[in-house]
Amino acid sequence: MGFSASRALAQGDEGLGEEEFRENSIVGRDLAFRFRYETQFSEDDGDLIDQSPDYARFPATINSAEAKLFQSSGASYSGTYSLWDNDQGLDSSRWSWKARLPITTTDFTDFTDVPPHISLAYRYQEGDASNLAWQAWQVGYDTYPTKTVYLSLQYRYSVLGGETSGHQVTEYMTWTHGKTLRIGEQVALSKTEGGEGVTPWYARLFTTVFLIEKWTSVRLEARHYQSDDDYSYEDYKTYLYQKIGRHSLLRLDYRYFLDRDGLDSNAVGLKLKHYLTPRFSVHVGYRYYEHSEGLTFDTYYAGLSLLL
């Protein structure tokens, strides 16, 4: 099979509109297997990661892996594992699995043929300062009620240290206009065990504009977060996606954060992804973080994706 840029990018890089299931088409089989791995490390100028109690849970290094199986019917099954190494001895690990199953079994080769799906997921985390295991079970439903609207609903039940810690309901919807514009919103409402009211909650708005189809796009996001102790913040994100030649993709991003106490931060980053073949890609990235209190961090990461 020749090297098709659109086929390659469909392996799952956000921002260029290639969201259809194409993994099975790439490998030419009803079953496709994808493996992803990424490692990242952060450093600062003031030994904050090593010594400051305010950053006791901040990971100096994160190693993560994902294995995912795709079926041509639209079903997928995935498992993830990550290890967070902490310079203050508060290491943590987390793993999860997820199954996403079509309600109908009709094979689909075109965007309009995507059937509704149900999903089941489980997450587990242990370690860090709390020393309590956190678990969550999640069930979801997603569908295209029209050719241009995508809708997802999810419910999550979580347990901390063997006792119920909370419930969360999340709604997500996007609307696509032709091949040039996508607008979306997401709302999550939580009920913390022992807390008052429905908190924490957040609302997010986003839009993606395709400046040049399958080559250049801009994504804008805005989110408001509110917790039951009256803490709130807003963050704003901007992404620029640019395909370079037929085999590479560049992402530039910027994030601004502001909380109710007047503290703010800025973060800029870049990610370069290159497809050695339609099935194998590698990426590298960098992120610079600056806080209003004078704190700065540098984060470097690299990874790979292999489709079999």
Image: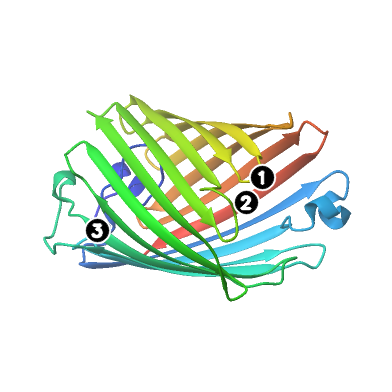
Name the quadrant of the N terminus: bottom left
- The residue singled out by tag 3 in the image is 117
* Callout 1 amino acid: Asp
In the rendered view, does 219 fall on the left or right side of 236?
left
Question: What's the residue type where badge 2 is placed?
Answer: Tyr
> Where does residue 182 sit, x and y in percent of width and height?
32, 31
Which of marks 3 and 1 precedes in the sequence?
3
Residue 57's image quarter? bottom right
Marks 2 and 1: which is nearer the front?
1
- Rendered-image quadrant of the C terminus: bottom left
Q: Quadrant of residue 89?
A: bottom right
Disc on the earlier residue, 2 or 1: 1
Residue 308 circle label: none
Of residues 167 and 51, the one nearer the viewer is: 167
The residue beneath circle 1 is: 229
Residue 242 visible at all: no
Q: Which residue is mark 2?
A: 301
Task: Give percent across and percent down for residue 109.
Answer: 15, 52
Instruction: Residue at 45%, 58% (x, y): give it.
Output: 305
Residue 54, above or below 30: above
Q: Residue at x 62, y 74 (%)?
A: 161
Vertical side of 132 occupied by 155: above or below = above
In depth, the one of 16 and 178 nearer the eye is 178
Nearest to the eye among marks 2 and 3: give it.
3
Looking at the rendered structure, the secondary structure element under dot 1 is: loop
